[in-house]
Image (spheres, rainbow, N blue to C red):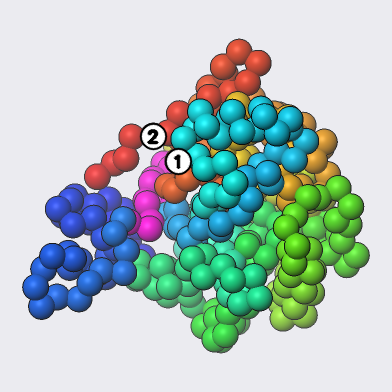
Amino acid sequence: MKLQQDRKSHETKSKSPVSKNTTATPSSPGRQKPEELVPSRYAVRVGEIEVLVVSDGVLPLPTAMLAHNAVPAERAAWLSDMFLPPDAFDWALNVVLVRSGAQTILIDAGLGSDPDLHLPRAGQTVKRLEAAGIDLSSVTDLVLTHMHMDHIGGLLVDGVKEQLHPDLRIHVSAAEVKFWESPDFSHTSMPPGFPDALRATAKRFMKEYHSQLRTFEEEHEVAKGVIVRRTGGHTPGHSVVRVADGGEALTFAGDAVFAVGFDQPDWYNGFEHDPEEAAHVRTRLLRELAASGDLLVATHLPFPSVGRVAIDGDAFRWVPVFWDY
């Protein structure tokens, strides 16, 4: 796997910004129409560690889920200021692949397929890893930030388990596994159907992969320079992953940070099982990142979701990196 070749591929395809295996342009006669008009993966290097951000697609969800504790008029004003639609918009879904030494680590696995929820534009991780030339059997470790279905569902797609290495290690916090034995949705604010789908997906995942779980309590070194740390909040076992080498660092924040969370860190997201604690986690993490200058990637920040955090009065400011072609 040569992740850094993706940067070069951006340069060679600047006239036709499509994915690696679909280089034809829509106007090219006699050529296949591309599946994607924009790249769906973005490679960065953290010291000697290679990191690849992969888009799993998008989830169309109600905008009220961004902040169910906010005054509707204030939420509407924020959406208007961001040039976003008032009722529903596409939430990004990102996963990350890391190569550290001999280990290849996938952080989260995307949505997979759930026809009952009618989300056909998500669940693209397996296809996009394949398009990047990454064999699932080469993945030595999987880290789960938490066990919501848009983070584990990719492992439940038909035929995926058979492609994975039989000795694959799946790292997840012990608190997360415990929570899904009897999950509490009393403080969430989700659209109809989602709680049942989340329960069913977690139950199926535990049945399929229980023997491969490697649980940790608070912090665990997955590979050299790759540390997963439990934060709680979003779910009791929610975790973030920090990749560090050569004086550089990147944190994959999972669902601890959403786009609105920079301006309004105290607004509650509808998927948060303990929204008050999630707001504390979010503020603490953003302050840490602002102080360190580390790169930030998160599941639901717009792809490629690579940037830094700055302090902006009582809130924060998202500073996206300049794309490196």
**Does the magenta portion include 45?**
yes
- Of residues 117 and 113, the one nearer the viewer is 117
Residue 89 visible, this orientation: yes
- Quadrant where the C terminus is found in the figure: top left
Disc sitting over residue 113 in the figure: none
* Secondary structure state at the residue bearing disc 1: loop
Q: Earlier in the sequence, mark 2 or mark 1?
A: 1
| Side of 215 relative to 247 (left or right) | right
The span shown in magenta is 39-51
Label 1 sits on what residue type? Val
Give the vertical position of 57 relative to 63 (above or below).
below
Residue 125 visible, this orientation: no
C-alpha distance separating marks 2 and 1: 6 Å
10 Å crowding of disc 2: few (<14), some (14-19), many (20+): few
Position of residue 87 measured from the top left corner of the image (x, y, whole percent): 59, 46
10 Å crowding of disc 1: few (<14), some (14-19), many (20+): many
Q: Which residue is mark 2?
A: 321
